[in-house]
Image: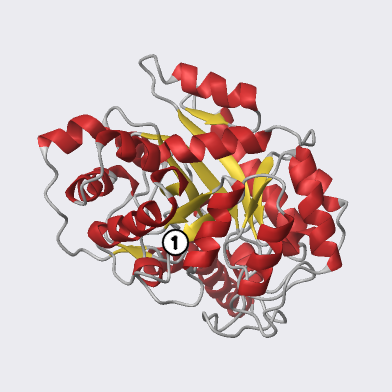
Amino acid sequence: MRKRVWVPLVVLALAAIGFFGFLPGYLEAGMNKIDGKPLIPVSAEAQALHKTLQIVDLHSDTLMWKRDLLGNVRRGHEDLGRLQAGNVTLQVFSSVTKTPRGQNYDSNGGDTDNITALAIAQLQPVRTWGSLLERSLWHAEKLDRAVAGSQGTLIKVSTDASLDAMLAARLGKSSPVGAMLSIEGLQDLEGNPANLDKLYAAGFRMASMTHFFDNQLAGSMHGLKKGGLTPMGRQVMAAMEDKGMIVDLAHCSHACVADILAAARRPVVSSHGGVQATCKVNRNLTDDEIRGVAKTGGVVGIGYWDAAVCDTSPRAVARAMKHVRDLVGVQYVALGSDYDGATTVRFDTSQLAQITQALLDEHFTPDEVRAVMGGNALRVIRAGLEPYRGG
């Protein structure tokens, strides 16, 4: 009898070890890929220029996965070692809290969720299993632990002073990487605008209104109704600008984009995506929307995956950037990789010289390359971190 009892328990234990130990990494490895196609040759000129750049990437989803930022797992697209190898100055880490089953670019409801199962499989704290707010706060805790354990090689950026300290530290030999928190869709407010205070206190300094479905703040480009800002959305946007949180247009419906651009008192960003002129995908920005972002003084972050630029080649990334430059000026272009966002790309963050070379091949000057690779984003982030004082 005792043997009969223990056999199922052993089988159950082995199954649990497989589920909780193996499955999360297996799923991630299958969703965040490098396509393996040939890279472009990087010249000595591009390599030399790349080493002098201040590089800023406005969007990655690395915190969603059960992976140590300081480790050497080599899954996905980035970790601290690869950020350093790519000469990244500042990485914006996004918090993803909910995605719909059957997720697609055209039409999704908000009544299902993939991230709950992921949170359980990754053995995240129980408080995160049923709360979107707690999932974001958990992502902030993960970053804080990585920063604390990095011996100064990863620095959290949430104020002008911390940004300046990180940039000053990079003038030495250690070359630390800055890390700033963002939110992919403010459904993590859970219908309560006061929760913005908790997210701000945890260090979040950028947020988009929506992700892949309509929520209580606005319509998503991938939602069912695709409406504009709701009264709550307008209230939260104003509060974000007052506090010093950058408003992100990514995933917003065209009506939502129009409402944000009309209401903006401060520079806004489109953190990751593309442009309709070079890749006609619904979430990419029209020329009028690009002009609107530029009018606020913001930036358009160009992604590296197929639906952003209709290819994974660094040359396709550079062509989208060239369109923005030629339309409104080079000061409004930035990087927005969407690394580790269930995307397939050509190169990981250690290989960002691919973009430097592609920009030079598109006849960007070295100063223009400096602006695109990080100077523009640093300008907008610095402006956005300060609480709004009117004017």
Q: Quadrant of the C terminus?
A: top right
Residue 218 screen position, x and y as percent = 73, 70
Please tell me which residue is depicted at 39% across the width and 38% down the height of the picture.
Answer: 371
Query: In the image shown, does 117 or 106 lie closer to the viewer?
Result: 106
Determine whether the residue tagged by mark 1 lies in a helix, strand or loop.
helix
On screen, residue 148 above or below 227: above
Name the residue tied to disc 1: 25
On screen, residue 132 above or below 351: below
234 sits to left or right of 94: right
Query: In the image shown, does 390 or 124 lie closer to the viewer?
Result: 390
Please tell me which residue is depicted at 27% across the width and 60% down the height of the picture.
Answer: 346
On screen, residue 178 above or below 75: above
Query: In the image shown, does 208 or 181 lie closer to the viewer?
Result: 208
Q: Quadrant of the N terminus?
A: bottom right
Residue 29 shows up from this direction:
yes
Query: In the image shown, does 307 or 294 lie closer to the viewer?
Result: 294
Mark 1 belongs to which amino acid?
A: Gly
Residue 187 screen position, x and y as percent = 74, 64
Q: How is the image coloured?
A: secondary structure
370 sits to left or right of 285: left
Residue 102 screen position, x and y as percent = 55, 84
Circle 1 residues within 10 Å: few <14, some 14–19, many ≥20: some
Residue 181 screen position, x and y as percent = 61, 44
On screen, residue 70 above or below 108: above
